Image (tube, helix red, strand yellow):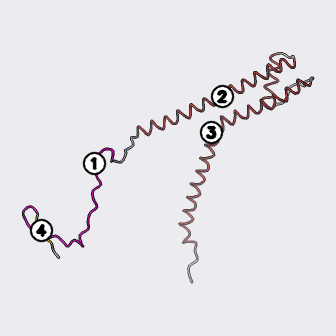
Amino acid sequence: MEATVSYAGGQLVAPPQEDRPIPPPAQTASSPADRPPTVDPLVIAMRHEMHRAGIRRRRRKRALYSLFAVGTVLALGTVGFYVVTGSGWVSSFYFESMLATGQGPPFPLTTAGAQLFAAAMAFLSVGTVITTLLLNLGPILGRIWREGFELMERELRRAERAIADEAPLLRRPPG
């Protein structure tokens, strides 16, 4: 079944409708809102830098909190040992810093009050130092941990692909 089509005053014969593929309608955007968003590389760089700035800001904040916490514990322990033991300021600071770092008391305490205060300060100061270390090193160690697992997973997938590519060679021929 042939159909005639008028074209610029002449006659053209078109193929039957069943044989002619129908092209899909053109996907043209009628307005800028309909167009797919384009991402400017400068915008990506700015977002990345803003993200990195936020990380640096959080690290500084954690470091300041840690310094404040350790400084407060050292000051509290120094004043407490000065009052309880009656030793000098330098000896009290030395005693508290040795407890805070887990070294133990540098000299024996004679009174029960001083020993109880030393025991309480040992728990408080060692706990504070460990907490501040984890607060500051935890995100860094977590990132190293995640990157290590991602690397391990990539290597595992690569090895699985290599084994799958060699698997036909390893199979026993039929017969």
Q: Position of residue 75 (x, y in %)?
A: 75, 21
The residue tagged 1 is: 30
Q: Amino acid at mark 4?
A: Leu
Would you call the spot at circle 1 few (<14 residues within 10 Å), some (14-19), or many (20 or more)? few
The residue tagged 4 is: 12
Q: Which mark is residue 145?
A: none
**Residue drawn at the location 59% of the way across and 54% of the way down:** 153
- Whether residue 26 appears in magenta in the rendering, the answer is yes
Do the residues under discs 1 and 4 have CB atoms within 8 angstroms?
no
Would you call the spot at circle 4 few (<14 residues within 10 Å), some (14-19), or many (20 or more)? few
Q: Position of residue 166 (x, y in %)?
A: 55, 67
The residue tagged 2 is: 65
Q: Amino acid at mark 3?
A: Ile
Secondary element under disc 2, as helix, strand or loop, is helix
* Residue stretch in magenta: 7-33
Do the residues under discs 2 and 1 have CB atoms within 8 angstroms?
no
Secondary element under disc 3, as helix, strand or loop, is helix
Q: Is residue 158 above or below residue 119?
A: below
Asked if residue 159 lies left or right of residue 81, the reply is left
Asked if residue 140 lies left or right of residue 120, the reply is left
**Residue drawn at the location 78% of the way across and 30% of the way down:** 124
Q: In which quadrant will I find the N terminus?
A: bottom left
**Residue drawn at the location 85% of the way across and 26% of the way down:** 117
Q: Nearer the viewer, mark 3 or mark 2?
A: 2
Q: In which quadrant will I find the C terminus?
A: bottom right
Q: Is residue 17 above or below residue 67?
A: below
Q: Nearer the viewer, mark 1 or mark 3?
A: 1
Q: Is residue 171 above or below residue 23?
A: below
Q: Which mark is residue 140?
A: 3
